[in-house]
Image (tube, rainbow, N blue to C red):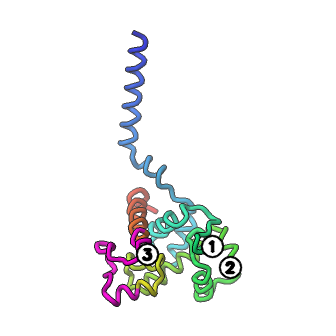
């Protein structure tokens, strides 16, 4: 009899926990999709007129908010910029005293440089967020060729036409996180 009562109590507790998780899915979502460096993201996004949700989605896709990472291809920092691209941004933006080591290990510096670059891509592609995301991964030259040749129209609906599988999946992943972050953090 005591075992039966214990099983019922455990079942009720388990059902209660499951109910709370489903009713409080925002809590679970925020746990599964956290945003780190919120103040730095907000400040840099505001400085360069880009959406903070998009900056966070790119960071999540690139490094999952971990500093000090270097890709197999040599991209560095929280936002994974290639060193040549980072050097170009630093020079064009007039950032002074920014070193490669700072870009690698300081979240605020990587977010600032990456946000400036994202704004530059947005402007280059006429505020087409999807094309800018693709260019962030494949490079603006490749995306410009695809658009000019009619290989891809720069829209999410036709993302399967992107010739590079890595870039196609990258765009899909960034947009997935972007939408998640917009739902979970509307006031961000």
Name the residue at 41% across, 76% down: 164
Judging by the rendered image, the residue that carries numbered circle 2 is: 98
Instruction: Point out which mark residue 133 bears.
Output: 3
For marks 1 and 3, give the CA distance. 20 Å
How much space separates mark 2 and mark 1, taking CA atoms?
8 Å
**Looking at the image, which is closer to me, 113 or 69?**
69
Q: Residue furthest top?
A: 1
Q: Any magenta on residue 158? A: yes
Residue occupying image coordinates x 47% and y 51%: 32
Q: Residues within 10 Å of mark 3 (few under 14, many from 20)?
A: many
> Of 92 and 173, which appears nearest the observer?
173
Q: Which residue is identified by label 1?
A: 109
Quadrant where the N terminus is found in the figure: top left
Find residue 126 and name its label: none
Which element is circle 1 on? helix
In the depicted structure, whether residue 36 falls above or below residue 115: above
Magenta segment, which residues?
144-169
Q: Earlier in the sequence, mark 2 or mark 1?
A: 2
| Residue at point 66%, 68% (across, down) | 106
Q: Are marks 2 and 1 in contact (CB under 8 Å)?
A: yes
Please give left or right for residue 124 compared with residue 44 in the image. left
Q: Residues within 10 Å of mark 1 (few under 14, many from 20)?
A: many
Measured Cα–Cα span from mark 3 to mark 2: 24 Å
Residue 103, given in percent of the width and then of the height, sits at 65, 73
> Where is residue 169 drawn, in percent x and y?
41, 68
Secondary structure state at the residue bearing disc 3: helix
Choose the circle earlier in sequence order: 1 or 3: 1
The quarter holding residue 98 reads: bottom right
Nearest to the observer: residue 128 or residue 157: 157
Q: Could you tell me what secondary structure mostly forms the magenta stretch?
A: helix
In the image, residue 10 lies at what x, y percent? 42, 24
Among the two numbered marks 3 and 2 on one chain, the one whose residue lies closer to the N terminus = 2
């Amino acid at each position: 009899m005591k075992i039966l009562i214990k099983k019922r109590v455990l079942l009720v507790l388990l059902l209660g926990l499951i109910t709370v998780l489903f009713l409080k899915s925002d809590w679970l979502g925020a746990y599964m999709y956290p945003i780190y460096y919120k103040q730095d993201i907000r400040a840099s996004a505001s400085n360069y007129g880009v959406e903070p949700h998009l900056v966070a989605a790119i960071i999540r896709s690139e490094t999952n908010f971990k500093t000090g990472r270097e890709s197999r291809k040599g991209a560095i920092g929280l936002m994974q910029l290639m060193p040549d691209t980072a050097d170009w941004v630093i020079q064009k933006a007039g950032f002074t005293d920014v070193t490669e080591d700072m870009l690698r290990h300081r979240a605020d510096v990587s977010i600032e440089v990456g946000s400036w670059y994202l704004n530059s891509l947005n402007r280059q592609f006429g505020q087409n967020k999807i094309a800018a995301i693709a260019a962030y991964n494949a490079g603006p030259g490749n995306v410009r060729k695809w658009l000019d040749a009619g290989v891809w129209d720069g829209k999410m609906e036709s993302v399967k036409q992107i010739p590079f599988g890595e870039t196609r999946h990258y765009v899909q992943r960034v947009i997935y996180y972007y939408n998640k972050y917009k739902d979970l953090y509307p006031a961000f």
